[in-house]
Amino acid sequence: MATSNYATTDNLIHLKQGALEAFVNPELGGAIVGVYYNSQPIMQSNLGATDPRKGACFVMAPFCSWLPEQGFDWQGQHFQQASNLLKDKPAVHGYAWQSCCDLIEQSPNSIILSFPVHKDWPWPYKLTQQIELNADSISITLLYINMANNVAPASLGLHPYFKLTKNMQIQVNNSPKARLNIVHGNINDECYTVRDWDGHIAITSPERNMNLSANSNSRLFLGVYRMANADTICLEPITQELNLSHIENPENGFTALEPNQSLELKVEIKLDN
């Protein structure tokens, strides 16, 4: 195992490749709680986080964001999932982020984690997360396999947090004109989906002398989320609309998986300095 210069808790796994380091907490839904390059955080980092939403990135599966309050229909049956966060709200972000993971494989710069099947999800599955560091990038791969005997709904997503700076620019898609409008000191939550996303993001932060790019095989939907007055923004590669409750037929928001069929989501976050 790589040695660390940071104060950490015993349950963290430390990955290192050159000047790039990452810390993962298997007991916190496999969340990446810190990512550093030359000892400088490149994402929201909090090694003492007890909530996955306070770290750098967490997994969303087998669904993303909010389920419809009224439940949803699938293959002619109605399903109603219990709340997993707020009592007066429907289930959110799936169940992986609230699970305790098993470590399957580990090397100095990579790990594979396995997630348990949640008792409240009617369709059994296998879910793994692979995290790998290269000299200037961190790659995350989610693999979901339907273990049910019938067609099952599935969605995958990642929920990374990026620190905002005053002059930061965020470009989505491979077009200089495709920029997100960042309102500093916003007093309202921002939450929307970028449709027809080509899988590319470029982040420029002059104050931190840091340029990041992210590439994903999702290439359909990018969720954008920012809490009111927050100093972070979430750019979420997802395989569905951000909120299933906002589309006319929530059943169409899922990927339909045949028995033993898989769904994969890959994301690479790269330093371009």
Image (cartoon, helix red, strand yellow):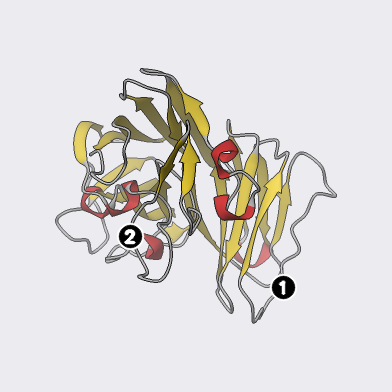
Quadrant for the N terminus in the image: top left
What is the quadrant of residue 199 in the picture?
A: top right
Say left or right for 165 vs 106.
right
Q: Residue at x 61, y 46 (%)?
A: 241
Q: Is residue 213 above or below residue 93?
A: above
Q: Is residue 250 above or below residue 148?
A: below
Is the C-beta separation of discs 1 and 2 under 8 Å? no
Residue at the farthest left position? 10
Ranked by sequence position, the earlier of labels 1 and 2 is: 2
Say left or right for 61 vs 268.
left
Q: Is residue 61 above or below residue 151?
A: below
Q: Give amino acid for label 1.
A: Val
What is the quadrant of residue 250 in the picture?
A: top right
User: How far across and how far down the image is residue 132, in percent?
Assistant: 38, 34
User: How far across and how far down the image is residue 259, in percent?
Assistant: 37, 18
Mark 1, secondary structure of its residue: loop
Say left or right for 95 vs 168.
left
Q: Relative to the observer, which residue lies in front, 54 or 62? A: 62
User: How far across and how far down the image is residue 55, in percent?
Assistant: 38, 60
Q: Tag on residue 64?
A: none
Residue 273 visible: no
Residue 190 visible: yes
Q: Residue at x 65, y 48 (%)?
A: 248
> Can you identify the residue that label 2 sits on?
84
Q: Relative to the observer, which residue lies in front, 178 or 47? A: 178
Q: Give amino acid for label 2.
A: Asn
Say left or right for 3 vs 202.
left
Disc 1 and disc 2: Cα gap in Å?
A: 31 Å
Mark 2, secondary structure of its residue: loop
> Can you identify the residue that label 1 sits on?
183
